Amino acid sequence: MNNRIVVIGSSNVDFIMKMDHLPAVGETVTDAVFVQTYGGKGANQAVSAARAGGDVWLVNCVGDDPFAALVRENLRQAGVHVEYVFEEAGIASGAALVMIGGAGRNYLSVAPGANYRLTPAMLQPLKPLIQSAALVMVQYEVLPETLLSAIDLAVEAGKPVLFNLAPARPLAGDALAKVDTLVVNEVEAQSLCGFAIEGPEEAARAAAALLARGCRNAIVTLGVEGAYVAAPGLRAHVPAFPVEAVDTTAAGDVFCGSLAVALVEGRPLLEAVHFASAASAICVTRLGAQPSAPDRAEIDAFLAAHRAGR
């Protein structure tokens, strides 16, 4: 079985403040807890996929600051191949400031830094790596032209693309027609469909609209309400596993990374979404992006415990 996943995307150094409530404009909240971890949607999804059992390679750029080596080492320890994490001179690595309040709600601000140094020209020599993959996973924390080039190279190689349109940004009209599996949350779905997504009913409508734009499978994640899944011959609402959330920052990234693993293992789409939902449920009970991603044994045990409890 080929379980190689090539992730083309971002990495960040995360600076996190955990507090009892998020500040209003002009308010200072004291007695916060500070944690420095690692994030970035590409790196988060790569780490999540590696811990869930995938053979994962990340394509990314870091800066020439002191954090670059730490980012690489953190990825390596998680089981991610870092041979194509390139160091760029004269620029800082990507960074994120995260404030987390009650119920795991958060504010985020991201400085892309070296993530925007990843160009289409840098991807061209990586055709053999892409050709060796079972699946290519992309997000939208890179330049638009780099994203589109990554999708085109995967399609050219005959490889399925899992695209998490996060964050929500304008997208070329024909891009979705090249995507095998699209994953979006409510805000991202609204950016594509033009109407608010406030629950499973609107998510079903959005997923149908996204299929009409050409993607093979559409998944709209709904936080505590689970996810809505649409594919040829399939329409289903998958409820979320009930857990007490501590930090929801990486919920979507862990969902995508573990979903990718389930798909390359050949699981049916609905089963793959259940697997991803379990991983995401575990992650929101922990603080930090990459530290919250569960390993395969944890996911399997979580699913077994919930099956036993039915």
Image (spheres, helix red, strand yellow):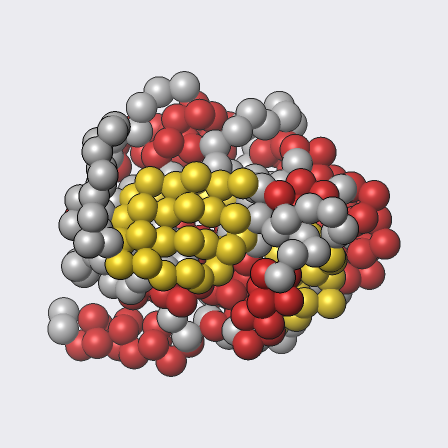
In this rendering, the answer to whether 174 lies above or below 237 is: above
**One can see residue 70 in this view:** yes
| Callout count | 0
Quarter holding the N terminus is bottom right
* Residue displayed at 62% across by 61% down: 66
Percent x, y for residue 198?
Answer: 25, 30
Q: List the single residue furthest toward the top.
A: 194
Which residue appears at 34% of the width and 34% of the height? 186
Q: Residue 254: which quarter of the image?
A: bottom left
Locate residue 245: give its quadrant.
bottom left
Residue closer to the observer: 155 or 91:
91
Residue 167 percent across, percent down from the top left: 48, 37
Q: Residue furthest right?
A: 125
**Is 135 on the left or on the right of 257, as rendered?**
right
Residue 108 versus residue 69 in the image, above or below: above
- Percent x, y of residue 176: 59, 34
* Picture coordinates of residue 159, whole percent (x, y): 69, 53
Left or right: where does residue 264 sit relative to residue 243?
right
* Nearer the observer, 31 or 24: 31
Residue at 85 percent across and 54 percent down: it is 125
* 10 relative to 87 in the view: left or right: left
Going 65% across and 33% down the picture, which residue do you hit? 144
Q: Is residue 135 placed above or below 51 in the rendered structure?
A: above
Name above or below for residue 91 compared with residue 48. above
Asked whether residue 180 appears in the rendered view, the answer is: no
Q: Quadrant of the C terminus?
A: bottom left
